[in-house]
Structure formats: structure tokens, C-alpha cells
Image (cartoon, rainbow, N blue to C red):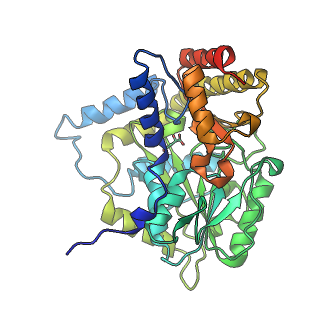
Amino acid sequence: MATINKNYDKLAAGYLFPEIAKRTNAFLQKNPGTEVMRLGIGNTTEPLTHTIIRGLQIGVEKLASVDTYSGYGDEQGDKRLRKALADRYEKMGVKLEPEEIFVSDGAKPDSANIQSIFSEDSVVAVQDPAYPVYVDSNVIAGRTKSFVNGKYEGLVYMPCTADKGFFPDLPSERVDLIYLCSPNNPTGAVATKEQLKMFIDYARLTQAVIIFDAAYSAYISDPTLPKSIFEVEGAKECAIEINSFSKDAGFTGVRLGWTVVPKTILTAGEDASKLNSLWNRRQTTMFNGASNIVQEGGLASLTEGGRRECQSLVSYYMENARTIKEGLEKLGLKVYGGTNAPYIWMKTPNGTKSWEFFDKLLNEAHVVCTPGSGFGPSGEGYVRFSAFGHRENVEKAVKSMQDNLRL
Ligand code: MLT
């Protein structure tokens, strides 16, 4: 008799973004014909650049001829792409072997799957609020107990509050895995080198591993802020980094990402290369490699022309971020993030709960945001706005909030 994985029953709610879509659709059913402006999920809207389209076309054309056709590729990714990524790190002063870089179909699956190479009894610490995948994947894997008063028992929440610039203190108890995300989803805060160093020193001292999500690193324009944790001394001994072509090159629907597992990470009683070989084992068993067409597009995005074009995509979204941030500030609202990150984190007025404000915003201004409480208990009383919209839609949303939101 088959029995289910009961850990799924522990999950507190449906996954955040489908839940938002459900509520938005319910609103549209009740108010047919209403134009809704979506600043909820961080879903890109602008077309792929010329160089990337050409790269994808090359990928397609190769499949049309017996001489250039390819079937299964390396599960770890096309060697040229792994090398191009290593070169990109080298430009940041980070030396990595291509064998330490694993190409995948996106940062979301990697950030959900990476926990599988650690022991079941690992104690997990997450920033609170955090991208829900880190928490949910560990709940499903059985590393937590029940959901009580907004928290999973057994999970270590590291509150990220306004008074501390939305960066956490070190955990006060022993933890084994630490998820950090910078630029942060959802708060838009960016960790400094000193802040990351504090966690790196802690991880090295306690043989914990940091899982660093750098999916939004392309949005950092301040040259003093690190785009990779490996820019900080000691990180290659204790950190795994996950990144994406989604937010940088517009591959949200195309799907491509990568994970760096250095061969120098220290874990209890194992060789330094053990985690790298475990992730290799996991990927070769459960993944057949990213699409060959898509990898050609990824390679094109890393050429000089591709980089320049992606930079202009990033600037476009950052102009949206400025528009949203200033628009909300003009309404007298307290906002954070949005300068080196594509997310704007807003304190809800008058102590309104996150979902209550979500409903109010949708009903009064027809704008969709993401309720902060969906990212963890410390997100309560906040909402997140995404800058990934189309400009016209973003401007309409800001105008509608200014004209219609009753504060
Ligand atoms: C978000 O809105 O937080 C992200 O777009 C979700 C994702 O990248 O999976």
C-alpha cells in the first residue's frame, strides 16, 4: 500500500505566487473588464535581446543538420558555458574551475534541490522573510516539525528587521545550513562584504554551509557591494552559490541557471570535494542537462554584446524600481530596497496586515503586490512590489495608487 510523504501536509499554505494569482483571478471574476496592474511576482516582461535571440536561433539551426545535431549533453552543462561562467567570475576576481559550476534549468529548482545533499537531521537557518522555496523544500524533506503560530518548529528563523537594515544577526544556536539571499528577495536589501564575512567566519568556525542565492546580483550597481559571496575571503571553504539567467537576461520562461559548488568546502568528516561530487551525483541521476538550445542563448548572453544588452534590460527594470519607489514615497509610505535590487519592500500603513493590504490595494487601485507575510513571520506588516513590469503598466499602477488608494 502506497503512503504519501506526510511532510507535504505540514506545508502551511499553497505556494505563495499561485495563491496570489488565485486571489487576483477571483477579483477579476467579480469585476470583469477591470484592468489589473501586476507588480506581484518577479516575472520579467521585456523581450530577449537581439544577441540572445541569435544565440537561440543558432541552437535551433544546429539541430537541423546531422553534422551539428546533439542529443543528451553533459548533465553538468555545456563545457563552453561552464567556462564562460568561470570567466565571468574571474572578472570579479573569483577563481573557479568550470567543474565547480553546474548549469541547470534555473535557480528555483537548484535552491529547492540543493538541500538533498545534506543529512536529514541538518538544522536549517533562513533569513526571515525569505524566498519561500528554501523553507518549503526543507519542510518537504522532513527537516521541520509542524507549523505553529506562523513558524515551522525545528527551523531557525533569523529575523531581518528594518532597524538592522534587513540583515540578520548570527544564529544564537548551532545550525548546519544557512540560506542567505543578496540582493534580497523580498526586502531588496544588499549585504555588504563585512556582513557576509561575519557569516563566513561563523560557518568556517562551526563547519556550517551557506547556501547563497545571488539570482539578483546583476541589479547591484554600487561597486562596493559584492555580487558573489566568493568575492569575500573564506567563502570557498563554506559556501554554495546559486544564480540565474532569469532576472539578468530575461530567461524566466526560457529557463537556465547555475550552481557553484566549490571543491574546497569543509563538511564534518569528509573530503573537501565531497559536496561537489554529491551535487554531481544528484544532477547526473535526476537531471538530464539544460536544453541545448537554451544553453546557446545563455552563451550568447555572456558575450560582450550580450552583456551590454542585458545591462540595458537591468537599467530598464531599475528605472521601474525608481518610479515605484518614488511614487510610494510621494504617498507618504515607508519603502526600502529598490536601489541595488528590483524589489521594493513597503511597510503597510496603520499596522495593516499584509494580506489585508493586498486586498485593499487590489480593490481600490487594481494593483497586485506580494504580501510580506508570505515570506515569513517577520514579513508581516509589509508588502513587496516587483519592478519587472512593462513600463506603461508600472506607470499606470503608480498613478492608480496615487489617485485611488485611500490611506
Ligand atoms: C519572486 O517573485 O519572488 C520570484 O519571481 C519567484 C521566482 O523567481 O521563482
Residue at the spot 65% in from the left edge and 42% down from the top edge: 353
**Nearer to me, 22 or 272:** 22
**Nearer to me, 265 or 134:** 134
Q: Is residue 402 above or below residue 340?
A: above
User: Hey, which quadrant is residue 3 in on the image?
Assistant: bottom left
**Nearer to me, 138 or 304:** 138
Q: Is residue 148 above or below residue 226?
A: below
Q: Position of residue 37 (x, y in %)?
A: 52, 22
Q: Is residue 212 above or below residue 390?
A: below
**Residue 24 seen:** yes
User: Hey, which quadrant is residue 343 in on the image?
Assistant: top right
Residue at the spot 70% in from the left edge and 33% down from the top edge: 338
Residue at the spot 46% in from the left edge and 16% down from the top edge: 34
Q: Tell how many labels.
A: 0
Q: Position of residue 241 (x, y in %)?
A: 57, 57
Left or right: where 261 falls relative to 324: left
User: Hey, which quadrant is residue 319 in on the image?
Assistant: top right
Q: Position of residue 181 (x, y in %)?
A: 63, 52
Quadrant assignment for the N terminus: bottom left
Left or right: where 233 falls relative to 40: right
Left or right: where 252 falls relative to 220: left
Left or right: where 380 falls relative to 293: right
**In the image, farthest residue toward the front:** 30
Residue at the spot 38% in from the left edge and 37% down from the top edge: 254
**Residue 369 seen:** no
Quadrant assignment for the C terminus: top right
